[in-house]
Image (cartoon, rainbow, N blue to C red):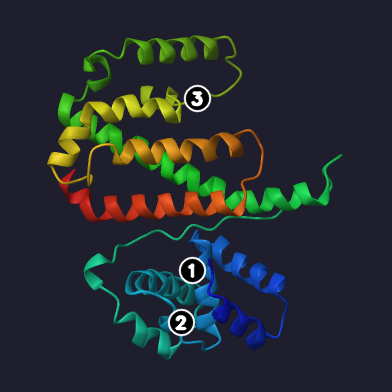
Amino acid sequence: MINRELKSKLIKGLDVSGAAISKKASAIRDKLLMPTDVSYYILAHSIGIKIKKYLNDEKFQETMKYQNKWATMNGNMAKTGKKLAKKSNKRNSVKEHIIKIDSSIISKEPLLSATQISESAKMLTTFATLYLLENSIRKFLEIALEKKYGYDWWNKLPKLDDLKRNVEDRKKNEDKNPWHQKRAKSEIGYLDLKELNKLVKKVDDKLVKDGILPKRGWLENMIEEVYHSRCVICHMNPLNSENIKLVDVQYTKWCRQINAKKKLL
């Protein structure tokens, strides 16, 4: 939720409507896959509004991290931005890749409304976030399982015959259509997102004991929450703003946790 006073200052400072403010903030958000509220704060900062008075320390540091990326991308980092950035917690800073999404849309889709075309552009960023989150979780589990069970971990995993049957069945179905590319290169890629939780249970205790995950069930709960949003968007339906934010929050949580603990893997 954006502070009302801050939003009013934005509207007054830019001399545009609330809808135009939302559009400008979305343009910033879509460039760097940042949480929606952070894009508003960056927009406010860009016109000289002192955003720190509206944010707690954690949100301010998160905002300035994205502000630095935004300013660097546009080649015009302001002196005030540099001064504020120095106050952020350097110990928590991580090197990250900047990912750009091509949001160009073909405008002659048959039968679809303007709303659906607009929704497709809006979902590009959220799909990319889900793509990155899910593949990161799969890679994380591969590393954790190999560390515990060895290189041939898939064949050594106990009491997962149902998952192994599912994978074999999916591979057999692929063989019926050799004209199409394979679903994945490794077995874990043949599992649905929700099925990954059975793998999590095999390493959860060790990951918590090693200090990589904060508590048992943390990753399982994340997968469970993201799964619902994934089902909507993968069946070609748009997420509402609340669930877009939920995906953004889960992705941010995941990145912070693993970037801080990846040396322990």
Furthest residue in direction right, as rendered: 111
Tell me where residue 242 appears, x and y as whole percent. Answer: 56, 53
Nearest to the observer: residue 243 or residue 72: 243
Question: Local crowd at mark 2 within 10 Å, few (<14), some, or many (≥20)?
Answer: some
Which numbered marker is on residue 183?
3
Q: Which mark is residue 51?
A: 2
Q: Is residue 198 above or below residue 49?
A: above
The kind of residue on which mark 1 rests is Val
Q: Nearer the viewer, mark 1 or mark 3?
A: 1
On residue 38, which mark appears?
Answer: 1
Residue 106 as seen in the image, left or right of residue 156: right
The residue lying at 54 percent from left, 11 percent from top is 173
Q: Quadrant of residue 93?
A: bottom left
Q: CA distance from mark 1 to mark 3?
A: 35 Å
Do the CB atoms of the residues marked 2 and 3 lie less than 8 Å apart? no
Residue 161, picture quadrant: top left
Residue at the spot x=61%, y=82% of the render?
Answer: 10
The amino acid at mark 3 is Arg
Instruction: Indicate the secondary structure of the residue bearing disc 2.
Output: helix
In the rendered image, the vertical position of residue 159 relative to residue 204, given as above or below: above
Residue 154 placement, left or right of 105: left
Total labels drawn: 3
10 Å crowding of disc 3: few (<14), some (14-19), many (20+): few
- In the foreground, 38 or 6: 6
Q: Residue furthest left?
A: 209
Residue 40, position as x, y percentages in the image: 55, 72
Residue at the spot 22% in from the left edge and 14% down from the top edge: 158
